[in-house]
Image (spheres, rainbow, N blue to C red):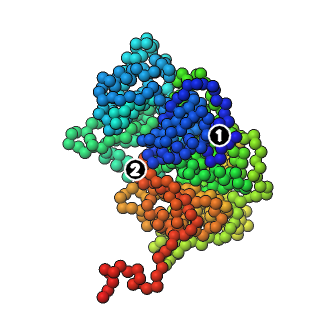
Amino acid sequence: SYASGSSCGELSAMALPRVSRTFRVAVRAQRGLEAVVHQELVSWKMPMARVNPPINQYVEVEGPWACVQGISTRCRTAETVSVRVGEGFVCKKEGVFVQRIQELPWEEFLDPELLAVIPVVVESTDSRLWDAKKLTILVQDALAEWARDRNAGPWDDRPLPRGVAVEVRLNNNQCVVGLRCTGQSWPRAYMYPSELQASAFVAKMPARAKVEEKKLGHSNWLEPEAQATGQPSAVVEAPWWSLKKHVPAPPPVPVADEIFDSRWELPPTYMAAALTLSGVVRLLDQPGTLLIWDPFCSYGSPLLETLATLLNVPVQGNAVPHPFHLMKPNDDNEEISSPPAHPGISRVVLLGSDKEAEKLMVARQRLRDFWAHHKQDFTPSEEVDTKAVKAERPEFEYVAPYSPPRAGGSQAGVGSRATQARGRKRGRSESRRPVAAEDIPTGVTATPEESAGAARATAPGQGSGTGPGRKVFAYTSKDDPAMEDLPCEVVLCRAPFEYVAPHVRGAVVLTRMPRAVETGKGPSRSLLELFERFGHMIGARSDLRGVFVYSETQEFAQRSRLEWDCLLRFNDHRNRRARFFKWTGRHKALLRTETPAAYTPPLTRGG
């Protein structure tokens, strides 16, 4: 069976092995998302398991080894998952620290040959032993000595799974040791770069970031000579008087992760947390088609995370080796099977729209890579969908012509003559951009009048100017031979959200608002106008089933002129103030008075 509102499904229906031993699993979350991770784990209703309250970015779960497998493969909001080795201890001296590390029951989890070569990660906070680099060397030497005492042979050079490591955490002189069961949960396995993604993403990467990295003396991108070996190039040590010495260099990004630069894209764990709070999965229990619309699709990361949650597939896929596969308890227990998807998954339509064709090309390629990677992980439900409604096609219905809002006495999107000139200039530049016919296939049009003349439509890639006559170019997975087995439909449209909105009815809007470039001057005027147009479009609709917005710009809630409930508030990995909003269905109340003296401060009144 399937648990509504859960990204993992109901683990209680799985056959758990009868093992009396209990393991303790530490689930690490992004700071501010601990409550969301706790909510997701509690909603699974795992038998023979207890979920403890979150403490210091960690949620601890006590249960059998099946819980370790299920959490490691299906917890979408977690960053890393590790299993505790032994009990915690207090240490204030290096000698005691090394002795207690060697006394832990390592033989119950790993072979001595593997323990001698496994990486070590040390984190120290408010402890007397504060030097993480020195502690890492001490732990490596202690584990190597422990392996030599047990006559450990050489490792057979088998490739280790991504993310395997010994995790040592010190907090207020309390030391806890564990073994990581998973690597970093993002980027997802289907986001590994292809030739199309790398060329499009590098072309769109702002040049200002490269200049900043050159000034700081380090780079997140591997040099050409280092790409062949996969190792980062050596960085010259800065002199003592240079400011570069005080700037911490970020860890090098592996070659497989170059496409996902977290400075410009949204990590999938944040979108998974938003899906957990929004409860979109529970809408499948209602009859009719579930249409989810992302007006600012960009490279498709939020849309694909929504698709993975609805399909109920593992986070990285069953084909990806996990570190817990190397542990001894995993050999004594059977692998758990993938829970089936919701029986109403065939009634789901995911719609993503964006103005830039290059981003949609990357999103389409990621969609194909996603289904090629997770096709064998998808388990259809054997239950009959009783909520299906026949003869219903609400995904693209004409509602009413859209009229842009008015802001500051002029029509937003039209504005002054200078604004109109900029719009005409953008339209000419877009029309001159070469777009291949196979890149942007034609689909629905903007108005019913254009539908009548669709037979006289021009070749794909043309007719992309501004104005009401602009066509909406669309790609649908139903017409793609590579996506023929996908149980739901995914549509990508190249058009602004104003031109897609008239064709959408009864949708759930789930998107991430564009954010301002980090220049220190705040959002631009065009971005503020975008917030106003988006708020007017949402406020003018009464058929939407829900509006959820992830925003990193503080001015969005005010400029949209709508009333929002903040479901989540935290600082992301770039230390930006992120908010996840839900629209209450009401407009923001404005101050209305009859005379200026009623709202003028007393100190500024004349006389």
Q: Earlier in the sequence, mark 1 or mark 2?
A: 1
Q: Residues within 10 Å of mark 2 (few under 14, many from 20)?
A: few
Callout 1: SS: loop
The label on residue 575 is 2
Check the image and report above or below for 595 versus 332: below
**In-front residue for pair 418/177:** 177
Residue 417 drawn above or below residue 428: below
Q: Position of residue 30 (x, y in %)?
A: 46, 44
Residue found 72% across the figure and 41% down from its top: 381
Residue 10 marker: 1
* Element class at badge 2: loop
Of the residues shown, which amino acid type is indicated by label 1? Answer: Glu
Residue at the spot x=54%, y=30% of the render? 322
Q: Is residue 134 above or below residue 300?
A: above
| Image spot of residue 547 (x, y percent) | 58, 60
- Vertical arrangement, residue 432 with respect to residue 120, above or below: below
Task: Tell me the kind of residue under disc 2.
Answer: Asn
Q: Quadrant of the N terminus?
A: top right
Q: Residue at 54% of width from left, 65% of height from top?
A: 534
> Where, by quadrant of the figure, is residue 115 drawn?
top left
Q: Residues within 10 Å of mark 1 (few under 14, many from 20)?
A: some
- Quarter of the image with the C terminus is bottom left
Where is residue 188 shown, x and y percent of the image? Answer: 54, 40
